[in-house]
Image (cartoon, rainbow, N blue to C red):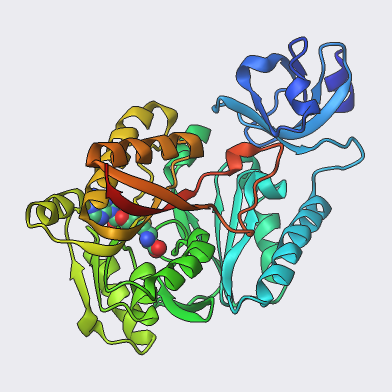
Amino acid sequence: MGASEKTGRKLVTLHKGRERSIIKRHPWIFSSAIASVHGNPQSGDTVEILTQDGQWVARGAYSPQSKIRIRIWTYSERIEVGEEFFQNRLERAIGKRSNLLEAEDTNAYREVYAESDQIPGLIVDRYADVRVIQFLTVGAEKWRDVIVKNLFDRGDVSGIFERSDVKVRELEGMSKRAGLLAGSIPNNPIEIIESGHRFRVNIREGHKTGFYLDQRNNRKLFRKMAAHANVVLDCFSYTGAFSMLALEAGAGEVVAIDSSSSSLALAEQNIKLNDLSVERWEAVNDDVFRVLRAYRDRDKSFDLIVLDPPKFAATPSHVERATRGYKDINLLAIKLLRPEGILFTFSCSGGISAELFQKIVSGAALDAGKSVSILHWLDQPQDHPVKLNFPEGRYLKGLVCRVEENF
Ligand code: SAH
């Protein structure tokens, strides 16, 4: 009888030397690092991870279908994975945000950011008195009831809604799922406050968990810069957060482009909700690439443009195509900017590094024949922190550029 049968524990032994990444506290173990598995662990089960010579190194969730075969729960042998474990981790993650965000007149933010909060596979976003959550891995899924109970028993929300309707679940052998998990939520969009501004959010069907919470800090800077702009272009506007702030800052005219008519309809509601007139706002329900080319052909120009496209590179294999997409829209935008015009340009593709993104924008400026300066490098905010031992947690990057003169 092997050790695992005796103790009832499920054990995974690594190939020689493959504990190196764990010693550096990286939370993933790839299938190629694993020499043998004992105790027949099932999807999501907690396994003990041992070096080739039998030393205990970590405890993690086993995912038989994913190339990321194990995600680490703990590097400490004393810490068992159970109700108390999730209680502590959730308490810690949520506690960190409450201090941070009370001061910001904001009641919508990320409360749990997966690996960055040492709860791989779990996303919890707070929208006023509702939590919206995603279970992205079989490990997090296994503890779903414990997690939901904890998040509801805190007594600070009226309902919890699940938005695990995301493609990445397929990599873990799980199908998509969405629906009410606890309590109740309103039928209509929920109203939230971000940096003192009101927004309606459709948590049932909106993108991600409903709102791009990760742009909060960048929107603050955008609002400041929009105060000096006459004509503003909000590309990939979704529910109009950037548009609304430009109008609020006093921009003369704001054009929003999005291929989703329901997003633009909610954008209009958001503008009105903040007591702003929609007369200075034009919604263009079309493809950004097409509209930008048409503007170029008509010599239309802008003082401030924001490009906040969806993830062009969902996986590393799409990086080349994504690079072309980013280059195209940035080239067009740079051409459409008036002298001294400002470009806010973003990429939320994890596969496109900040360095590569800057190179792409640089190539676009060169092709546009313009001298361009970077004024700011932008990132995701504090509620989406990046652990030094898990740089993969960084996905959002942006540049604020000033288009100066022709080369
Ligand atoms: N800037 C927004 C978030 C943008 S999300 C905010 O701050 O809230 C990306 C948006 O791009 C989505 O609303 C999606 O409908 C839209 N979209 C995706 N591809 C598009 C395309 N080719 N043309 C126009 N809109 C597009």
Q: For the C terminus, give its image quadrant.
A: top left
Total numbered badges shown on the rendered structure = 0
What residue is shown at x 38% (from left), y 71% (from top)? 226
Q: Is residue 205 visible?
A: no
Ligand 1 quarter of the rendering: bottom left
Residue at the far bottom in the pictured view? 275
The reply, left or right, for residue 241 in relation to residue 350 is left
| Residue 359 percent location from the top left of the image | 41, 35
| Residue 13 percent location from the top left of the image | 77, 17
Q: For the N terminus, give its image quadrant.
A: top right
Q: 255 or 145: nearer the eye?
A: 255
Q: Report which quarter residue 312 is drawn in.
A: top left
Residue at the far right in the pictured view? 78
The reply, left or right, for residue 341 in relation to residue 261 is right
What residue is shown at x 64% (from left), y 59% (from top)? 382
The reply, left or right, for residue 49 in relation to residue 136 is right
Please determine whether, in this image, residue 150 is positioned above or below residue 328.
below
Q: 238 or 304: nearer the eye?
A: 304
Q: Report which quarter residue 3 is drawn in.
A: top right
| Residue 309 percent location from the top left of the image | 34, 51
Q: Is residue 191 visible?
A: yes
